[in-house]
Image (cartoon, coloured by chain):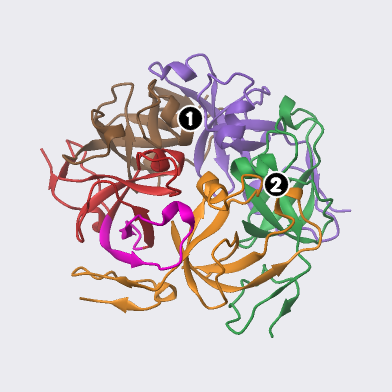
Chain colours: A red, B orange, C green, D brown, E purple
């Protein structure tokens, strides 16, 4: 699973049947790349989230007919870097508690 | 799901059975790389689209016998960057509304 | 699906059961990287092809017991860049018709 | 499967149903990138682990309802580089025995 | 499928149930990155091999309960670069016959 930040919403009038009624969130991953994800948790712009890809992402929507390959799996409150704190990519740093 | 632009069509006389009657669209992704996708939404050259990969992409064709690993999921009208507008890759910028 | 060029054949005496009787083609992708694919269309050295990955690639062999993750999906005759011709990676340029 | 180091834990109040009761471990891969994995083996901060991705990673949790795409497959004690010792990425070097 | 070289063996006392009795081979891919694969063909250190990923790799083990995402598919004897010999990545060059 990957860490990304929600940066906006995608508007698409013409879509495949399996994605007709899904809000599509625009995310920016740790390298600055924009990706598109479905959102079953109600994330807002600016939220740090983790994403689930592949068939797990599809199942995470709770409806197999939704044909996504990337789903927001949860909103990150914070993380605990522990004793061996990572040199976190700048883009991936919500609130880090270094114990 | 990824953001790409439609840049052309691929012509292939000899193909596997599972892709015989599918128009194959040539897309350019945000890094400038060319990829090939099936197209159930009727995108045209120049359109910005998002793509669905893997088994979700195959199911999005509405016919399991179509053996694609990348399908155009929808045509992008525009996106809303919100308060925390991304530093969008240049290649990935149709119409961006920054509220 | 990705665009590659056939550059040779791989010889392997010892293989897993699911790949025993498959010619294995050596391909070079757009970044110059060598990859290995099964070939149900009879591509020859020098041909430009597109490849199908994952379970779609396995199904494209027409025999589920063939345990490949990359299959040649078709031989590219040429492509039509259209009005918005791509800045094609040099490695990926068979015959391009710019209308 | 990939080699990573456990660097912390992710705290997420709001999650999809399929990941509600799973500790989410923060890992750093060989390129320094942070990724998130479920953990059925009880790894601790600082441990070197290998990860299993995709549907194999989901099945490795022992409960299909857990919707992960990356699972810790085991804790690395050490590895044997053999006669042809690799030029190991610095980030990926727990205890290496070069015979 | 990808080309890699076997560079060692991974020792892990604590593992998930689906990988308990599998030797885990350490491979170096064409970019020098270390990856971990299961081995149904008995490859030895120094051997050049090709690997099968995803569900095909799992099925290639001949036992669905083995939860790998990367399996050695065969040991490379040599390859035939043909008339259009590739500019092979240095790391990926066992014995190349250029006819």
Residue C24 position in % (x across, y down) = 77, 42
Write down the quadrant of residue E88 in the picture.
Answer: bottom right
The secondary structure type at the circle numbered 1 is: helix
Residue A61 position in % (x across, y down) = 35, 43
Q: Which subunit holds the residue at mark 2?
A: C
Residue topped by disc 2: C71
| Residue visible at 58% across and 78% down in the picture | C87
Q: Is residue C57 left or right of residue A60?
A: right
User: What is the quadrant of the C terminus of chain A in the image?
Assistant: top left
- Whether the magenta-drawn stretch holds residue A20 is answered as yes
Q: Tell which of A50 and C63 is nearer to you.
A: C63
Q: Tell which of B62 and D38 is nearer to you.
A: B62
Residue A10 position in % (x across, y down) = 34, 65
Residue A18 versus residue B91 in the image, above or below = above
The secondary structure type at the circle numbered 2 is: strand
Q: Is residue C36 left or right of residue D7?
A: right
Whether residue D32 can be seen here: no
Q: Which subunit holds the residue at mark 1?
A: D
Write down the quadrant of residue D53 in the picture.
Answer: top left
Residue topped by disc 1: D56
Extreme residue toward the top, this view: E21
Which stretch appears magenta? A5-32
| Residue visible at 49% across and 58% down in the picture | A16
Crowdedness near tag 1: few (<14), some (14–19) or many (≥20) residues, C-alpha within 10 Å: many
């Amino acid at each position: 699973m990957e860490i990304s930040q929600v940066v906006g919403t995608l508007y698409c009038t013409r879509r495949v049947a399996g994605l007709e009624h899904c809000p599509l969130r625009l995310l920016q991953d740790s390298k600055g790349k924009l990706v598109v994800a479905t959102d079953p948790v109600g994330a807002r712009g600016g939220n740090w989230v983790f994403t689930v890809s592949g068939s797990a992402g599809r199942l995470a929507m709770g409806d197999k007919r939704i044909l996504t390959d990337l789903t927001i799996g949860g909103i990150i409150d914070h993380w605990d870097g522990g004793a061996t704190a990572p040199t976190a990519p700048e883009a991936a740093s919500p609130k880090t508690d270094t114990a």
